[in-house]
Image (spheres, helix red, strand yellow):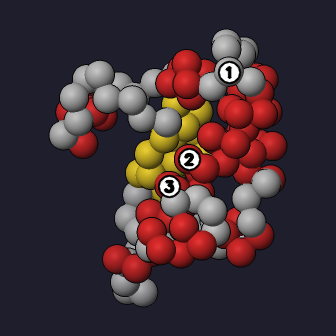
């Protein structure tokens, strides 16, 4: 599957709209950005091999690790990688479901949600 950037970003927006409100309502100061694929530098910084398949990553400081005394931060980011998702998915419905799962997983890193709770929500 191959979509234009515009159609892929529309799929990302639809996928985000499907995320349970208890998660969406807590996504403050968080930007979701689409990139073609993870850069070599990013993979190296993460200690991942160059051929690692990533659908997305969270880039920021998780809320539980922040102090009320820290100065305001720039928005945290979730990067969604278009090419790996397109290569993995065969239909637009499958793509939107995979984007939703990826965003929820990355938001969990931001919020400090554990894997047990993600499992309860159907994102484990």
Say which residue label 3 marks. Answer: 106
Along the line of sight, which residue is nearer the eye, 113 or 26? Answer: 113
The alpha-carbon separation of the residues under discs 1 and 2 comes to 17 Å
The alpha-carbon separation of the residues under discs 2 and 3 comes to 6 Å
Say which residue label 1 marks. Answer: 90
Query: Marks 1 and 3: CB-CB under 8 Å?
Result: no
Query: Marks 2 and 3: CB-CB under 8 Å?
Result: yes
Question: 65 above or below 103?
Answer: below
Query: Marks 1 and 2: CB-CB under 8 Å?
Result: no
Say which residue label 2 marks. Answer: 102
Q: Does the rendering let one see residue 119?
A: yes
Q: Earlier in the sequence, mark 1 or mark 2?
A: 1
Q: What's the residue at 72%, 38% (across, down)?
A: 96
The alpha-carbon separation of the residues under discs 1 and 3 comes to 23 Å
Name the image quarter holding the N terminus: top right
Question: 107 above or below 51?
Answer: below
Q: What's the residue at 31%, 29% (across, down)?
A: 52
Q: What's the residue at 41%, 51% (across, down)?
A: 59
Q: Secondary structure at mark 2?
A: helix
Rendered location of residue 53, percent (x, y): 39, 29
């Amino acid at each position: 599957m191959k979509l234009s950037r515009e159609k892929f970003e529309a799929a990302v927006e639809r996928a985000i709209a499907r995320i349970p409100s208890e998660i969406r309502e807590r996504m403050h100061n968080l930007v979701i950005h689409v990139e073609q694929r993870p850069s070599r530098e990013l993979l190296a910084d993460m200690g991942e091999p160059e051929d690692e398949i990533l659908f997305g990553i969270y880039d920021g400081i998780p809320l539980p690790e922040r102090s009320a005394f820290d100065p305001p931060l720039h928005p945290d980011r979730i990067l969604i990688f278009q090419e790996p998702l397109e290569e993995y998915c065969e239909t637009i419905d499958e793509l939107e479901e995979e984007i939703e799962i990826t965003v929820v997983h990355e938001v969990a890193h931001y919020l400090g949600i554990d894997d047990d709770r993600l499992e309860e929500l159907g994102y484990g």
